[in-house]
Amino acid sequence: MRAVVYDRYGPPDVLRIEDVEPPIPKQDEILVTVHATTVNRTDCAIRGGEDFITRLGYSIVTTGNPFAALRRPTQRILGTELAGEVAAVGAAVSQFKVGDRVFGVNAGHFGAHAEYVCMRERAPLAQMPTNMTFEEAAAVCDGAILALGCLRRVGLRQGQKILIYGASGSIGTAGVQLAKLSFDAHVTAVCGTKNVALIQSLGADEVIDYTQEDFTKNGHLYDVIFDAVGKHSFRRCRSSLAQGGKYIPTDGWANVFWVAWTARIGDKRVVSDVPPHYRQQDIRFLKELIEAGKYRAVIDRCYPWEQVIEATTYVETQQKVGNVVLTVSQVSDTSGS
Ligand SMILES: NC(=O)c1ccc[n+]([C@@H]2O[C@H](COP(=O)([O-])OP(=O)(O)OC[C@H]3O[C@@H](n4cnc5c(N)ncnc54)[C@H](OP(=O)(O)O)[C@@H]3O)[C@@H](O)[C@H]2O)c1
C-alpha cells in the first residue's frame, strides 16, 4: 500500500509518499481502507519533534519507553483521524463487518496517513454518521473529543457562563458547538474578525472579536475560561473568572505549575485534561449528535493526500479554521500490491 512516511523529525518536507507493507489485522482488529484523514496539530507537533518534552511524551505513549523516540520517530506513518470502509476483520471481531463505513481517531497509534490502517475493535471508532461524506467524518473526532474532555473536566453545567478563547480552531469550533448544544451553557466565543460570522453560525451566544475588544478588560465574569488554542494564560484572565471559576488550557507546559499552585491557593483553579481520553462511546455520542443535526465538523481546506506537505505547511501557520482534510486515493484491493 502507499503511505505518507517520515524517518526523522523536521520540517514538513521530511514527509513523502512511499510503498510500504500493508498492516495485517490481528484477531481483535479491523482493517480500514482510509478514504479521508486530516493533518492536525498533533501530527505537526510529533513530526516537528520540536522539544524534548514532546518527544518524551510521544515516546512513552507509543512505546512505553521514554527514550525510544528521543532521537528519531518510532513510527513512520502519522495521522490520527480517519474515515473509511472496513476492508477485513479479525476472527474475534463482532461489532464491525466488511463494508461498514467507519470514522474515528487512532490517537496514540497514528498510521492514518495511509491507504490502510488497523484499529482494535474497541478503539475510538464507530459507524459513520449517515449524513456525512468521508471528508466531513474524518474531521470530526480529534477536536471534538479534546473539547468534550475539557468541558467535562471543568464540570460545565447548564446555564453557566463559559468563554472560549480561540473559538475558530479545531478544538474551538467543536467546543462552541458542544458547550451550547450538549451542555446548554451560555457561550461567549473569542476569535479574529474574519471568523466572527462562522462562530455565530455555530451557536455562540456572544462573539468577541479580539482585534476590537479585550475580554479581560470588559468587566464580565465567567464560570469557565476555555483556552482552546493555547494562546492565553491564567495570569492574564484570572480577573475575568467568577468566584470558584476554572481556567482550562489546551497547551503550555507552564500550566502544570498553575494546576498544582491553584489547587492549594485561592478559589480560582487551573485544571487540565492531559492526557486526553479517547473512548468509543464518545465517538458514538458524536455520531448521534451529528445525525440529530446538532454538530458539524468545520473544514477549512481539503487537499489530495499527494499535497500533504502543502497541507501540513498550512496547518503550521496556526491559522486554519477548524480542520484540514486529506483525501486519500481510492484503492481497489487489500493485497497491498
Ligand atoms: N491537549 C492535547 O492533547 C492537544 C492535542 C492537539 C492539539 N493541542 C493544542 O491545542 C491547541 C489548539 O489546537 P487546534 O488544532 O484547535 O488549533 P488550530 O486549529 O490550529 O487553531 C487555529 C485558530 O487559532 C486562532 N489563533 C491563532 N493564533 C491566535 C492567537 N494568538 N490568539 C487567538 N487565536 C489565535 C486562529 O483564529 P483567529 O484568526 O480567529 O484568531 C485560527 O483559526 C494547540 O495549541 C495545540 O497544540 C492539544
Image: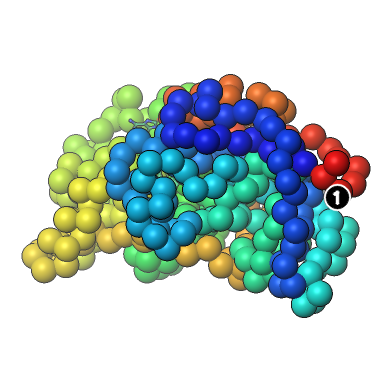
Quarter-of-image position of residue 92? bottom right
In this view, the residue in front, 251 or 115, is 115
Q: Is residue 136 visible?
A: no
How far from the left and from the top, in percent, is residue 125?
Answer: 67, 62
| 169 relative to 334 in the view: left or right | left
| 275 relative to 314 in the view: left or right | left
Q: Is mark 1 within 8 Å of ligand 1?
A: no
Question: For the residue marked with disc 1, what is the amino acid?
Answer: Thr
In this view, the residue in front, 41 or 194, is 41
How far from the left and from the top, in percent, is residue 67?
Answer: 35, 53
Does 128 sit above or below residue 239?
below
Please tell me which residue is depicted at 31% across the width and 59% down the height of the picture: 272
On the image, numbered disc 1 is attached to which residue?
A: 334
Please tell me which residue is depicted at 10% across the width and 64% down the height of the picture: 266
Please tell me which residue is depicted at 67% across the width and 30% down the height of the picture: 17
| 19 relative to 160 in the view: left or right | right
Does 8 sit above or below residue 270?
above
Q: Quadrant of the N terminus?
A: top right
How far from the left and from the top, in percent, is residue 176?
Answer: 48, 49
Please tell me which residue is depicted at 20% across the width and 48% down the height of the picture: 254
Quarter-of-image position of residue 290? bottom right
Split into quadrants, the picture shows ligand 1 in the one at top left
Mark 1 surroundings: few (<14), some (14-19) or many (≥20) residues within 10 A: some
Query: In what element is the residue under mark 1?
Result: loop
Does 115 sit above or below residue 123?
above
How far from the left and from the top, in percent, is residue 64?
Answer: 42, 63
Colouring: rainbow
Q: Quadrant of the C terminus?
A: top right
Q: Is residue 209 visible?
A: yes
The residue sitting at the left extreme is 265
In this view, the residue in front, 308 or 233, is 308
